[in-house]
Amino acid sequence: MRDTENTTSFSIIYNSFFGKITDDMYMELTEDDTADLVEELLNTAIHKFEFPRFDITDIDKEEKCFNTILTDEEINILSTYMIVEWLGQQLASVENVRMKYSGSDFKFTSQANHMSKLLTLKKDYEREGFHLQRLYKRRLKDEDGIMRSTFGTIMEESPICRRGSGSWS
């Protein structure tokens, strides 16, 4: 049996994702099919999380969990990027390319307008994910639980990039 006190289940990130979207398709699928689809979204979202404070690749695929405890902030970043991927799937869907009926008088809506709004929404979520990551990297919780700026360490040179090391010189 796995020590769940030191892990974060994928289901926690999935719940955050489902709390941010509305998609009736997931209600029509089996629980296993839904799990497979959201795991695919999470796997893609993981790669968008640029500089996490934990080893993002340290996961247990069988138990479907990260082998560390994620903060609410990290969960929010991952679920936001899951939305980016979900919106990308919506844009790539044939259903969204076809003309749609709208309103009681059944006028056609513009395909281009519909796609443009989806693309704008996707870009908004990408910007939100980037903003969340900037905040994440610019602050740390101290031993008293107070958020402190990391500004003092942001401009420090990386040991890899110091002069004379062969790079950035």
Image: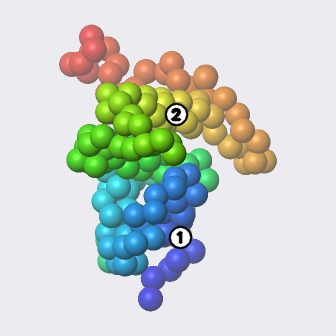
Q: Give the vertical position of 133 relative to 95 (above or below).
A: above
Q: Position of residue 128 (x, y in %)?
A: 52, 33
Q: Which residue is mark 1?
A: 6
Q: Position of residue 59 (x, y in %)?
A: 36, 65
> Which is nearer the eye, 96 or 7?
96
How many numbered circles are shown? 2
Amino acid type of the residue that numbered disc 1 sits on in the rendered structure: Asn
Residue 128 marker: 2
Q: Give the vertical position of 55 relative to 124 (above or below).
A: below
Q: Tell me the residue at 53%/24% (across/down).
A: 154
Q: Tell me the residue at 52%/53% (across/down).
A: 21
> Which is nearer the eye, 116 or 134?
116
Q: Is residue 5 visible?
A: yes
Left of 10 or right of it: where is 90?
A: left
Q: Tell me the residue at 37%/36% (across/down).
A: 108
Q: Give the vertical position of 165 relative to 15 (above or below).
A: above
> Which is nearer the eye, 104 or 70?
104
Q: Position of residue 12 (x, y in %)?
A: 53, 65
